Image: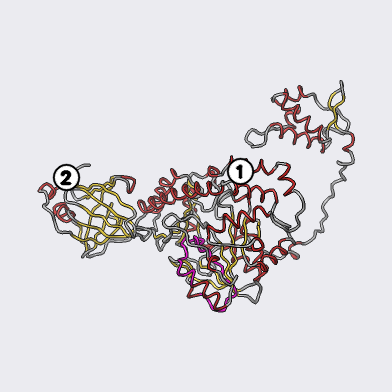
Amino acid sequence: MLQHLFALEADTNISLQQQIKQKLIEAITHGYFPAGSKMPSSRKLAEQLDVARNTVVFAYQQLTDEGYLISKERSGIYVSENLNARFEYSAKVQPSKEQCHWSTRIKPIDKSKSLPPYPDNWQEYPYPFLAGQFDLTLFPVNPWRECSRLTMNINEINTWANDSGSQDDLFLIEEIRTKVLPRRGIFAEPEEILITIGSQQGLYLLSELLLNQQTLLAMEEPGYSGMRKLAEHRGAAVDLVDVDNKGIMVEEINNHVDAVYTTPSHQVPTAVTLSQTRREQLIAKANEHDFVIIEDDYECEANFVSNPHPAIKSLDSQGRVIYLSSFSKVVAPGLRIGYMVASAEFIKAARNLRSLSVRHPPANNQRTMALFISLGYYDTVMRKINQTLQQRWQELREALNHYLPTQIVTSHSVGGSACWIKGPKHLNSQEFATQAAKKGILIESVTRYYGKQNKPERYFRLGVSSIEVGKIRPGVELLAQIFRQNQDAEVESLPLQAQPLAAEQLADFLANCEFIGRTVFGEPYRIKLSADGKMQGWEGHHNEKTDTGQWWLEGNTWYRQWKNWSYGEVLGFNIAVQGKQIFWLRNDKLVDSAFFTKKSPQSTPPSMLGLTKTP
């Protein structure tokens, strides 16, 4: 029965016609339909496979055009007799007991530390907080399809199908040079640009050209493990330089390094942005001490709080900065098109080295990407992705600040697709990630980003590029439950001198009181309570965010409800004070703390002194 031989799949992107064609070729090449034999009629095959007859007819026609089948008038369809020479197979060689020992010949490469920290089926998890993963909903299907179609025009095929040696698509080079790089403050000549198979190939090329057992490479700590592994592969010494809220600490870079690798836009993995002052300090130090800067411009335009800084390359007057970027974040990682900008001399050497393995990245993909930029789709998709990431990033910040205020500290970032989080002292991020995965939450344990032997265990990372905005809040809420359920959880205790406030004290204390504190992101906030139960809030260094709400008392519990903040939920707390510090407690556990000031009281309504109210 042919239906067993032709097992068709419904859950696939391959059409029935193409599946049937593939199965027929397999059957012919493996001898099920010998050369010269008659094929089943299209009607019979269609009936047995339960498909439309035209589907089989089209498959037969294609195989006839390609020489697998021949049509004999008034006789039927036959397997071509000219296939014998093409499909002669020798007997299978039986393996010998004596085998070539490849383990003694191959130079070992430890890939374990570079493996993704998430399962292959991560898309099946309900809450994948993974940074840098591909979100199918953001892929520009129609624009990319149009550009791919244009690439297949005869005139376009003539431009990319020929062997161009090691040269890249000049159209793409020009689009990058004139439309992409100027946004980063970079102005380059065509001979200063090289197309790469993603940024990783660019890093590999420069590591081969610059690093050896006599060179010293400075890297961020924590930092991108892929670059550290390349340095180890080349035998180069690595000097690990700490990162703070302003990026790599330039003053700690050894004056005798040969190169510095940095991810200044959104540092991998902490997502902090290298300040403009430090960018200028870094280029000045490189000029003074004659070392090279490798600038991996990761997520260069995903700033949501402030405008992006110009690239370090834009400050380069001596041609010592090698700039790398990629289109993976805009289109899809599988596209594998990146680019390198450096001095013409270095690009020439990198092009010669690249040609020893691949002459150039696929020319048709280069031309499609060039059309994608030239037709304005790149800018449109970039705006859409940034808007989506900004919405998700802000939702993550809101959820973290709402559900985990005292248990975590996050890095001071201005955007990007991830939040770097420092948990309680007890936290083992590997075990925590395992616990979270059992609940359907994927988070990234970040020990692989550290090059030191003693790796801190309490850090982890939450990404938003792969999770829908509607799943962020419930995912963080569930994550907070895992925190609380952990028996070893470190609970911040109330100071011994702090005095809980009873019902008769609360109304008088809270009326015309202001709280001054910081969010989990280190941003300042101020909350003002009025005696009439109204509440105002300001957040940010310049009061960028504001909200209003109301507060009331029920016994010993202070309740508050914002209009927008904290999802507009009603939350109740017990309150204690010590000096000028106020503490909020829930179920006798410390939730948050801040400093308070008492403003000059207005005429307080008598009803407020024993306020019992519901919103």
Query: Where, quadrant-wise, is the N terminus in this rendering?
Result: top right
| Three-letter amino acid code at the position of disc 1 | Trp
Q: Is residue 363 left or right of residue 556?
A: right
> Which residue shows up at 60% across the image and 47% down it?
372
Residue 314 percent across, percent down from the top left: 54, 65
Residue 575 percent across, percent down from the top left: 23, 55
Residue 582 percent across, percent down from the top left: 24, 60
Q: CA distance from mark 2 to mark 1?
A: 61 Å
Residue named by callout 2: 612
Q: Is residue 258 magenta-colored? A: yes
> Which residue shows up at 37% across the image and 53% down it?
484
Q: Are marks 2 and 1 in contact (CB under 8 Å)?
A: no
When asked about the image quadrant of residue 28, the answer is top right
Residue 166 percent across, percent down from the top left: 73, 58
Residue named by callout 1: 144
Magenta highlight range: 253-280
> Which residue shows up at 39% across the image and 56% down it?
487
* SS class, disc 1: helix
When asked about the image quadrant of residue 275, the answer is bottom left
- The image's mark for residue 55 is none
Q: Nearer the viewer, residue 488 or 263?
A: 263
Q: Nearer the viewer, residue 311 or 411?
A: 311
Q: Is residue 249 magenta-colored? A: no
> Which residue shows up at 25% across the image and 51% down it?
536
Reading the chain from its start, which is encountered first: label 2 or label 1? 1
Q: Nearer the viewer, mark 2 or mark 1?
A: 1
> Which secondary structure is most common in the magenta stretch?
loop
* SS class, disc 2: loop
Q: Residue furthest top?
A: 74
Dot 2 crowding, Cα within 10 Å, few <14, some 14–19, many 20+? some
| Three-letter amino acid code at the position of disc 2 | Thr
Please tell me whether residue 82 is drawn above or below residue 325 in the rendered image.
above
